[in-house]
Image (cartoon, grey):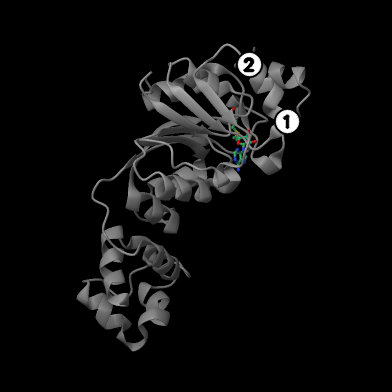
Amino acid sequence: MKTGDWLKKYNIYLKKSLGQNFLATLDYANKIVQKAGITNDDTVIEIGPGAGTLTEALAKTGAKIFAFEIDLRLKPLLKERFQNYANINIQFIDFLKADLSKFNKPKYVANIPYYITSPILEKIFLETPDFQLATLMVQKEYGERMLAKSGKNYSPLSIFVQFFCNVEKLITVPPHAFIPNPKVDSVVIKLTPKHNIPDIDKNNFFKFVHIAFSQRRKTIKNNLKSLFGDKTEDVLKKCNIDPKTRPENISIEKFIEIFAYTK
Ligand code: SAM
Protein backbone atom coordinates (compact mmCIF):
# COMPACT_ATOMS: atom_id res chain seq x y z
CA MET A 1 0.00 0.00 0.00
CA LYS A 2 1.21 3.54 -0.76
CA THR A 3 1.53 6.22 1.93
CA GLY A 4 -1.60 8.03 0.65
CA ASP A 5 -3.67 4.83 1.01
CA TRP A 6 -2.51 4.31 4.60
CA LEU A 7 -3.36 7.89 5.50
CA LYS A 8 -6.80 7.59 3.89
CA LYS A 9 -7.50 4.30 5.66
CA TYR A 10 -6.83 5.89 9.07
CA ASN A 11 -8.29 9.27 8.11
CA ILE A 12 -5.10 11.13 9.02
CA TYR A 13 -4.49 14.69 7.85
CA LEU A 14 -0.88 15.79 7.86
CA LYS A 15 0.21 18.65 10.09
CA LYS A 16 2.59 21.30 8.84
CA SER A 17 3.39 22.22 12.44
CA LEU A 18 5.02 18.78 12.92
CA GLY A 19 7.04 19.00 9.67
CA GLN A 20 4.89 16.22 8.17
CA ASN A 21 5.98 15.80 4.56
CA PHE A 22 5.83 12.04 4.07
CA LEU A 23 7.55 10.03 1.35
CA ALA A 24 4.79 9.06 -1.09
CA THR A 25 6.16 5.64 -2.10
CA LEU A 26 8.91 3.19 -1.25
CA ASP A 27 11.06 4.27 -4.24
CA TYR A 28 13.09 7.00 -2.54
CA ALA A 29 12.90 5.19 0.82
CA ASN A 30 14.65 2.16 -0.71
CA LYS A 31 17.21 4.42 -2.37
CA ILE A 32 18.03 6.17 0.92
CA VAL A 33 18.41 2.87 2.80
CA GLN A 34 20.63 1.46 0.07
CA LYS A 35 22.83 4.60 0.03
CA ALA A 36 23.09 4.45 3.84
CA GLY A 37 24.45 0.89 3.47
CA ILE A 38 22.29 -0.57 6.26
CA THR A 39 22.75 -4.31 6.96
CA ASN A 40 21.12 -6.76 9.36
CA ASP A 41 23.92 -6.22 11.93
CA ASP A 42 22.97 -2.58 12.42
CA THR A 43 21.05 -0.78 15.12
CA VAL A 44 19.18 2.04 13.43
CA ILE A 45 17.46 5.01 15.03
CA GLU A 46 14.74 6.66 12.95
CA ILE A 47 13.36 10.05 13.97
CA GLY A 48 9.71 10.47 12.95
CA PRO A 49 8.56 7.30 11.14
CA GLY A 50 5.33 9.02 10.05
CA ALA A 51 3.28 6.47 8.11
CA GLY A 52 6.26 4.10 8.12
CA THR A 53 7.44 4.27 4.51
CA LEU A 54 11.14 4.77 5.28
CA THR A 55 10.69 2.47 8.30
CA GLU A 56 9.49 -0.34 6.01
CA ALA A 57 12.51 0.04 3.73
CA LEU A 58 14.77 -0.01 6.81
CA ALA A 59 13.03 -3.01 8.37
CA LYS A 60 13.44 -5.09 5.23
CA THR A 61 17.23 -5.03 5.74
CA GLY A 62 16.79 -7.05 8.95
CA ALA A 63 18.47 -4.33 11.05
CA LYS A 64 17.09 -3.53 14.50
CA ILE A 65 14.99 -0.39 14.12
CA PHE A 66 14.18 1.99 16.98
CA ALA A 67 11.83 4.76 15.89
CA PHE A 68 10.58 7.81 17.81
CA GLU A 69 7.32 9.43 16.72
CA ILE A 70 5.67 12.36 18.49
CA ASP A 71 2.25 12.11 16.76
CA LEU A 72 0.04 9.63 18.62
CA ARG A 73 -2.54 9.61 15.80
CA LEU A 74 -0.12 7.41 13.83
CA LYS A 75 -0.07 4.63 16.44
CA PRO A 76 -2.85 2.36 15.04
CA LEU A 77 -1.57 2.78 11.48
CA LEU A 78 2.01 1.85 12.40
CA LYS A 79 0.78 -1.02 14.58
CA GLU A 80 -1.03 -2.58 11.63
CA ARG A 81 1.71 -1.86 9.11
CA PHE A 82 4.40 -3.53 11.18
CA GLN A 83 2.43 -6.29 12.90
CA ASN A 84 4.56 -8.95 11.20
CA TYR A 85 7.95 -7.39 11.89
CA ALA A 86 9.88 -8.45 15.01
CA ASN A 87 12.76 -6.03 14.41
CA ILE A 88 10.88 -2.74 14.89
CA ASN A 89 10.41 -0.88 18.15
CA ILE A 90 8.42 2.36 17.98
CA GLN A 91 8.15 4.76 20.91
CA PHE A 92 5.56 7.51 20.76
CA ILE A 93 7.54 10.29 22.39
CA ASP A 94 9.34 13.49 21.44
CA PHE A 95 12.75 12.43 20.09
CA LEU A 96 14.29 15.50 21.73
CA LYS A 97 13.29 14.05 25.13
CA ALA A 98 14.28 10.45 24.39
CA ASP A 99 16.87 8.67 26.52
CA LEU A 100 19.55 7.52 24.07
CA SER A 101 22.01 6.23 26.66
CA LYS A 102 21.25 2.53 25.97
CA PHE A 103 22.30 2.74 22.31
CA ASN A 104 25.64 1.40 21.24
CA LYS A 105 27.11 2.72 17.96
CA PRO A 106 23.73 3.48 16.37
CA LYS A 107 23.21 4.53 12.77
CA TYR A 108 20.63 7.24 12.18
CA VAL A 109 18.45 7.16 9.09
CA ALA A 110 15.60 9.65 8.96
CA ASN A 111 13.55 12.10 6.97
CA ILE A 112 13.67 14.65 9.74
CA PRO A 113 11.04 17.22 10.72
CA TYR A 114 12.55 20.41 9.35
CA TYR A 115 11.51 22.70 12.19
CA ILE A 116 13.89 20.98 14.63
CA THR A 117 16.86 20.20 12.39
CA SER A 118 19.44 21.93 14.62
CA PRO A 119 18.23 20.51 17.97
CA ILE A 120 18.20 17.01 16.40
CA LEU A 121 21.80 17.38 15.22
CA GLU A 122 22.85 18.67 18.63
CA LYS A 123 21.22 15.70 20.35
CA ILE A 124 22.82 13.17 17.99
CA PHE A 125 26.33 14.62 18.36
CA LEU A 126 26.25 15.25 22.10
CA GLU A 127 24.20 12.30 23.40
CA THR A 128 25.43 9.54 21.07
CA PRO A 129 29.03 10.55 20.32
CA ASP A 130 29.78 6.96 19.23
CA PHE A 131 27.17 7.05 16.43
CA GLN A 132 28.41 5.43 13.23
CA LEU A 133 26.63 7.57 10.67
CA ALA A 134 23.61 9.77 10.17
CA THR A 135 21.87 9.66 6.80
CA LEU A 136 19.35 12.46 7.02
CA MET A 137 16.92 13.99 4.57
CA VAL A 138 16.75 17.73 5.09
CA GLN A 139 15.51 20.76 3.18
CA LYS A 140 17.98 21.67 0.44
CA GLU A 141 18.77 25.01 2.07
CA TYR A 142 19.81 23.27 5.32
CA GLY A 143 21.81 20.69 3.38
CA GLU A 144 23.71 23.43 1.55
CA ARG A 145 24.55 25.09 4.84
CA MET A 146 25.78 21.79 6.31
CA LEU A 147 28.02 21.22 3.26
CA ALA A 148 29.45 24.74 2.76
CA LYS A 149 33.15 25.30 3.48
CA SER A 150 32.99 29.04 2.69
CA GLY A 151 30.77 31.61 0.97
CA LYS A 152 27.13 32.58 1.26
CA ASN A 153 25.87 29.26 2.68
CA TYR A 154 28.73 28.98 5.20
CA SER A 155 27.30 29.69 8.65
CA PRO A 156 27.48 28.68 12.32
CA LEU A 157 25.49 25.55 11.30
CA SER A 158 28.24 24.57 8.80
CA ILE A 159 30.87 24.95 11.50
CA PHE A 160 28.81 23.07 14.09
CA VAL A 161 28.25 20.09 11.76
CA GLN A 162 31.76 20.02 10.29
CA PHE A 163 33.35 20.30 13.71
CA PHE A 164 31.95 16.84 14.52
CA CYS A 165 31.50 15.21 11.11
CA ASN A 166 32.54 14.74 7.52
CA VAL A 167 29.58 15.78 5.39
CA GLU A 168 28.58 14.31 2.04
CA LYS A 169 25.55 14.83 -0.19
CA LEU A 170 24.02 11.56 -1.40
CA ILE A 171 20.96 12.51 -3.47
CA THR A 172 18.52 15.30 -4.25
CA VAL A 173 14.84 14.46 -3.77
CA PRO A 174 12.25 16.49 -5.72
CA PRO A 175 9.04 17.89 -4.17
CA HIS A 176 6.81 15.37 -6.02
CA ALA A 177 8.31 12.52 -3.96
CA PHE A 178 6.35 13.75 -0.91
CA ILE A 179 2.80 14.14 0.38
CA PRO A 180 2.05 17.02 0.51
CA ASN A 181 4.59 18.44 -1.97
CA PRO A 182 6.96 20.86 -0.21
CA LYS A 183 7.91 24.06 -2.07
CA VAL A 184 11.61 23.17 -2.24
CA ASP A 185 13.89 20.25 -3.08
CA SER A 186 15.24 18.09 -0.29
CA VAL A 187 18.67 16.49 -0.05
CA VAL A 188 19.93 13.40 1.68
CA ILE A 189 23.08 14.14 3.64
CA LYS A 190 25.47 11.59 5.09
CA LEU A 191 27.31 12.58 8.27
CA THR A 192 30.25 10.46 9.39
CA PRO A 193 31.83 11.38 12.72
CA LYS A 194 35.39 12.69 12.76
CA HIS A 195 37.79 10.94 15.11
CA ASN A 196 40.18 13.80 15.79
CA ILE A 197 37.80 16.34 17.30
CA PRO A 198 39.77 19.21 18.91
CA ASP A 199 39.75 19.13 22.69
CA ILE A 200 38.26 22.58 23.33
CA ASP A 201 35.31 23.98 25.27
CA LYS A 202 32.67 23.23 22.62
CA ASN A 203 29.85 25.25 24.15
CA ASN A 204 31.91 28.40 24.32
CA PHE A 205 33.43 27.76 20.89
CA PHE A 206 29.97 27.63 19.24
CA LYS A 207 28.90 30.78 21.13
CA PHE A 208 32.07 32.46 19.85
CA VAL A 209 31.27 31.37 16.26
CA HIS A 210 27.80 32.93 16.55
CA ILE A 211 29.39 36.21 17.64
CA ALA A 212 31.84 36.01 14.72
CA PHE A 213 28.88 35.70 12.31
CA SER A 214 26.60 38.19 14.09
CA GLN A 215 26.80 40.59 11.14
CA ARG A 216 27.94 38.50 8.22
CA ARG A 217 28.31 41.45 5.78
CA LYS A 218 30.79 43.09 8.15
CA THR A 219 34.46 42.23 8.62
CA ILE A 220 35.70 39.72 11.15
CA LYS A 221 37.43 42.57 12.99
CA ASN A 222 34.13 44.36 13.42
CA ASN A 223 32.31 41.27 14.64
CA LEU A 224 34.99 40.31 17.16
CA LYS A 225 35.43 43.79 18.67
CA SER A 226 32.96 43.00 21.44
CA LEU A 227 35.27 40.15 22.54
CA PHE A 228 38.78 41.49 22.04
CA GLY A 229 38.29 45.30 22.10
CA ASP A 230 41.48 47.17 21.12
CA LYS A 231 43.38 43.91 20.74
CA THR A 232 41.16 42.55 17.92
CA GLU A 233 43.54 43.45 15.11
CA ASP A 234 46.54 42.05 17.00
CA VAL A 235 44.79 38.74 17.63
CA LEU A 236 43.81 38.41 13.97
CA LYS A 237 47.33 39.24 12.82
CA LYS A 238 48.77 36.59 15.13
CA CYS A 239 46.46 34.11 13.41
CA ASN A 240 47.54 35.37 9.95
CA ILE A 241 44.08 36.66 9.14
CA ASP A 242 43.49 39.93 7.28
CA PRO A 243 41.19 41.95 9.64
CA LYS A 244 39.08 42.92 6.61
CA THR A 245 38.13 39.30 5.88
CA ARG A 246 34.44 38.44 6.16
CA PRO A 247 33.49 35.61 8.54
CA GLU A 248 32.19 33.54 5.59
CA ASN A 249 35.78 33.23 4.31
CA ILE A 250 37.39 31.95 7.50
CA SER A 251 37.95 28.19 7.90
CA ILE A 252 37.00 26.17 10.97
CA GLU A 253 40.69 25.65 11.75
CA LYS A 254 41.24 29.43 11.77
CA PHE A 255 38.18 29.98 13.98
CA ILE A 256 39.64 27.47 16.45
CA GLU A 257 42.94 29.37 16.34
CA ILE A 258 41.25 32.71 17.08
CA PHE A 259 39.10 31.11 19.81
CA ALA A 260 42.27 30.18 21.72
CA TYR A 261 42.82 33.94 22.34
CA THR A 262 39.46 34.35 24.08
CA LYS A 263 40.89 32.91 27.32
N1 SAM B 1 9.65 9.16 7.97
C1 SAM B 1 8.41 9.56 7.36
C2 SAM B 1 8.59 9.59 5.86
O1 SAM B 1 9.73 9.77 5.42
O2 SAM B 1 7.61 9.47 5.14
C3 SAM B 1 7.90 10.89 7.89
C4 SAM B 1 8.86 12.05 7.83
S1 SAM B 1 8.18 13.61 8.27
C5 SAM B 1 9.30 14.71 7.40
C6 SAM B 1 8.72 13.91 9.94
C7 SAM B 1 8.07 13.05 11.02
O3 SAM B 1 8.61 13.44 12.29
C8 SAM B 1 6.56 13.20 11.16
O4 SAM B 1 5.97 11.94 11.25
C9 SAM B 1 6.37 13.96 12.47
O5 SAM B 1 5.16 13.68 13.14
C10 SAM B 1 7.58 13.49 13.26
N2 SAM B 1 8.03 14.41 14.32
C11 SAM B 1 7.94 15.76 14.37
N3 SAM B 1 8.49 16.23 15.50
C12 SAM B 1 8.98 15.16 16.18
C13 SAM B 1 9.65 15.00 17.43
N4 SAM B 1 9.97 16.05 18.19
N5 SAM B 1 9.98 13.74 17.82
C14 SAM B 1 9.64 12.67 17.07
N6 SAM B 1 9.01 12.77 15.88
C15 SAM B 1 8.68 13.99 15.44
Quarter of the figure with the C terminus:
bottom left
Q: What residue type is labelled 1?
A: Arg
Ligand 1 positioned in quadrant: top right
Q: Where is residue 81 in the image (x, y as percent from the top left)?
A: 63, 16
For residue 112, which numbered disc appears in the image?
none
Reply above or below: 89 against 151: above
Q: Name the residue under label 1.
A: 73
Query: Which residue is situated farthest in the front direction here?
Result: 102
- Residue 38 or 16: which is nearer the viewer? 38
Q: Position of residue 56 (x, y in %)?
A: 54, 18
Query: Residue visible at 70% across and 33% down?
Result: 72
Mark 1 is surrounded, within 10 Å at the Cα level, by few (under 14), some (14 to 19) or many (20 or more) other residues, namely: some
- Residue 52 or 4: which is nearer the viewer? 52
Reply above or below: 222 against 93: below
Q: For disc 1, does the CB lie below 8 Å from ligand 1?
A: no
Q: In this view, does 85 lie to the left or right of 147?
A: right
Q: Residue 68 sits in which quadrant? A: top right
Could you say whether the residue bearing mark 2 is in a helix, strand or loop?
helix
Q: Earlier in the sequence, mark 1 or mark 2?
A: 1
Q: Residue 252 sits in which quadrant? A: bottom left
Q: Is residue 217 left or right of residue 116?
A: left
Q: Which amino acid does label 2 sit on?
A: Arg
Distance of label 1 from label 2 (alpha carbons)? 14 Å
Q: Mark 2 points at which residue?
A: 81
Reply above or below: 181 against 201: above
